[in-house]
Amino acid sequence: MKIKMPKTKVIATLGPASWDEQMITKLLKAGVDAFRLNMSHGDFQDMAKIIKRIRHCSTDMARGVAIIIDLPGPKMRLGEIPSPIHLKKGDEVVFTNGKKHSYKDAVYLPHEISGFEKKVKKNDIIYMSDGVLQFKVLEVKGKEILTKALLPGTVRSHKGINLPGIDFKDGAITDYDRACIEFAVKNKVDVICVSFVGGKEDIDKARALIPEDPHYRPFILAKVERIRAVEHIEEIVQAADAIMVARGDLGVELPIEEIPVIQKRIIRLANMYARPVVVATQMMESMVDNLRPTRAEVTDVANAILDGADAIMFSEETAVGKYPLEVVKMAMKIALMTEQELLETGAMSEVIREMVRDSKRIDDMISIATYDVLCNVSVDYVVTPTTSGTTARRISRLRPYQWILAVTDNLTVRNVMNLSFGVYPLYMSRLNIVGNDLTSFLEAQGILKKGNRIVITSGMPFGVPGTTNSLKVIDVQ
């Protein structure tokens, strides 16, 4: 078997356009590595069915896929709207959670925000849908907030509302989030995405809600989408298992012109600490309605990969768009072309070397030594038997040309390794690095063949996370 997928990982959000079994199978065949479920849309019963559907499809295809649930967090949202509302620039729009209608000719939008009328004043700007829609406050009367639409657009149920700089005093984990985490654990979800993280304490609170289980440890992925998160970014990267640059809310919280530089800084930090990093929001948003992305969107996806992103994520493009499959296929084409430049220059390796040159960690040294071998000796694959995936991630950040075959006996570990660039995860029910068991297993998968040369990284005592301390070059006989 020849591994033909791009090394960049693709995450697709599932929604009405994509959550049936036929489309999930098509997306997996196209190369999707992880599926995101937005817990702001859909109840637990529906989500449990979709999770079961994903597992069924991936099992049929004999490949792992990461399932991500995205916690709503303390985000302010609209209520239920019977059908989409199309607004024109200049329309009067009233936000309310009351029954009184004082403005007869205005469009009324229900919201789910306690004390919203106390949070705004005249001339404030209310943002919706990551800033795509903007409303200027004209007056506040009781529970009614009269505004004027500054931009045309379509409003749908439960869309997020932003007031830049608002302080979530109770932290990022709400009561509903706690219920979502309990649901995630019950259904053995691989990644729990914490929204509106402000600091390390929010990651710690989420992790404390997950029962200790040596066989199941889901990743905690921190979404960076607040000013406070940017200010505390290094402690967040250290505390979390993975990072997402969530440019939607971040682009409302901060001046939009700052986002490209902040994105690069976050990616560099995540790379330094060997945390998978995802870039999300409006990657190819024009494909919600169009068969082809814009040139700017193609460049955006490519630049995220060149910056060092492990994965790119699509939201509305695959959840409610007209062409979810075409979005993924286009992402694959962009990634394949971009990776040629990234892998041939070896630029990422020099950046990482400089970042960790003073590191005293043995696994940092082993990962750099592995890369040196790959550059100077003809090698087909890197093989990392692992119980946690840490070594695979440390080698991945150097962006070697060869695939990293990460073999584990833990299904959750296998699935979360789908978030790391250039890592091809495999499940081996009884992981064993003694004798020829490991190479025989890879030969049986159709990956290795006689005459291949591989680099194996491992640790003693075997099976203890964080003990990688050896490197071997082996010719497959």
Image: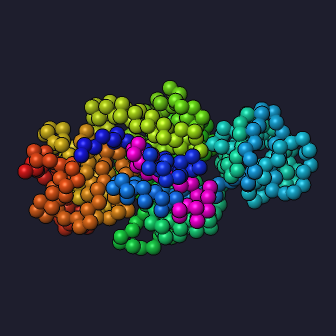
Q: Is residue 39 magenta?
A: yes
Lateral position of residue 441 relative to residue 99, left or right: left
Residue lying farthest to the top in this orientation: 295
Question: In this figure, what is the number of numbered marks?
Answer: 0
Indicate the quadrant where residue 349 lies: top left
Residue at figure coordinates x 71%, y 36% from the top left? 153
Comparing 335 with 49, the one in front is: 49
Measured along the vertical axis of the image, is residue 181 above or below residue 100?
Answer: below
At 40% from the left edge and 55% from the top edge, which residue is drawn? 58
Which percent across, then down, holds residue 151? 73, 33
In the picture provided, is 288 more to the left or to the right than 339?
right
Q: Is residue 349 visible from the viewing direction of this image? A: yes
Residue 477: within the magenta? no
Most foreground residue, 353 or 310: 310
Q: Horizontal placement of 286 versus 365: left or right?
A: right
Residues in magenta, as a range: 27-49
Front one among 450 and 141: 450
Q: Residue at x 90, y 55 (%)?
A: 100
Q: Position of residue 98 (x, y in %)?
A: 84, 57
Q: Is residue 366 visible?
A: no
- Residue at figure coordinates x 28%, y 43% from the top left: 3
